[in-house]
Image (cartoon, rainbow, N blue to C red):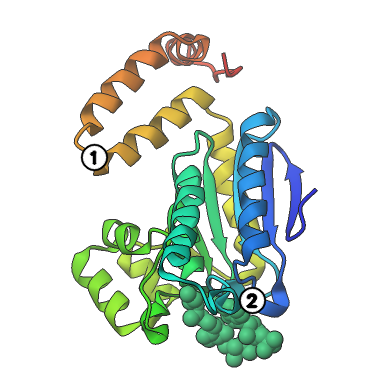
Amino acid sequence: MYKTLLATLENSILTATINRPDKLNALNREVMNDLDTLLNDIDSNKDIKAVIITGAGQKGFVAGADISEFVGLSREEGQALAQKGQDIFSRIENNRKPIVAAVNGFALGGGCELAMSCHFRVASENARFGQPEVNLGLIPGYGGTQRLVQLIGKGRAMELLMTGNMIDAQTALQYGLVNHVVPQDELLVKTKSILDVIVAKAPLAISKCIAAANAAFTEKGYQIESEGFGECFATEDMKEGTAAFLEKRKPAFTGK
Ligand code: COA
């Protein structure tokens, strides 16, 4: 079904592993097309309640867009490439189901941008983050200039963007770029344990959290929050959740 992704579904959590380890999982056209297909499948498959994106091997999450595909591109083709990348990563960011990056190694360029488009990030101790595009005479094109500023603040983002320097996992933790740093062999277990908590909640409430938190970066954030709050009142899950609290029992959410 996918050419460059391995997908396994377990306990409603889909783990999608980008599988080009010999190229440190660099994002070529095939990977980007597979990510697009993956997003269609996440939308249509009711059995998927949350997603982990990670990279194959122990060294790379994703070491960037595939630089070999940049050769000979015109200005228009370069812009179109960026637009396609931005569209796919925006679908990740705005997905109604939680999508988390389990960063198992280098997350550079498009790899850092992919991780940043996910709803949050868990990293292994050997993870490295950076936007090294300036070393190629380029800038990030898949949303990196925007999301890096949002996640770590303008001053730190400016320094990383302009130096092209990498930061290690502990620095990423200190910057708030990742939520947790764990030994590599615990990365998926830790990420799944967080998602196990999330998938037990009412799915509509989760999707409204995502939409409202994303809207913090628009002028309509408060409006989207109040509308989402209202929409939750129209669900069985909200009635069940509040009733369960008042009856001192665990809620049984059904997604209705
Ligand atoms: N695009 C295409 N191929 C890439 C790649 C990328 N972004 N990143 C790594 N690769 C390939 C290498 O060319 C190499 O392929 P080869 O074995 O056929 O020669 C393979 O992946 C392994 O990478 P290598 O450079 O040998 O590993 P390393 O441990 O010496 O260095 C990095 C690791 C991540 C520091 C280095 O690969 C690198 O700087 N990559 C590019 C990062 C980048 O600029 N990303 C932004 C792109 S916009």
Q: Which residue is mark 2?
A: 24
Question: Would the CB of label 2 be found within 8 Å of ligand 1?
Answer: yes
Q: Residue at x 60, y 79 (%)?
A: 68
Whichever of labels 1 and 2 marks the residue nearer the N terminus, that label is: 2
Q: Which residue is mark 1?
A: 218
Q: Amino acid at mark 2?
A: Leu
Q: Secondary structure at mark 1?
A: loop
Q: Amino acid at mark 1?
A: Thr
- Residue 136 percent coordinates (x, y): 42, 84
Q: Residue at x 49, y 23 (%)?
A: 204
From what the image shows, is residue 179 above or below residue 243? below
Q: Residue at x 37, y 83 (%)?
A: 137
From what the image shows, is residue 106 above or below residue 218? below
Q: Quadrant of residue 134?
A: bottom left
Q: Quick check: 180 left or right of 215?
A: right
- Residue 154 percent coordinates (x, y): 20, 65
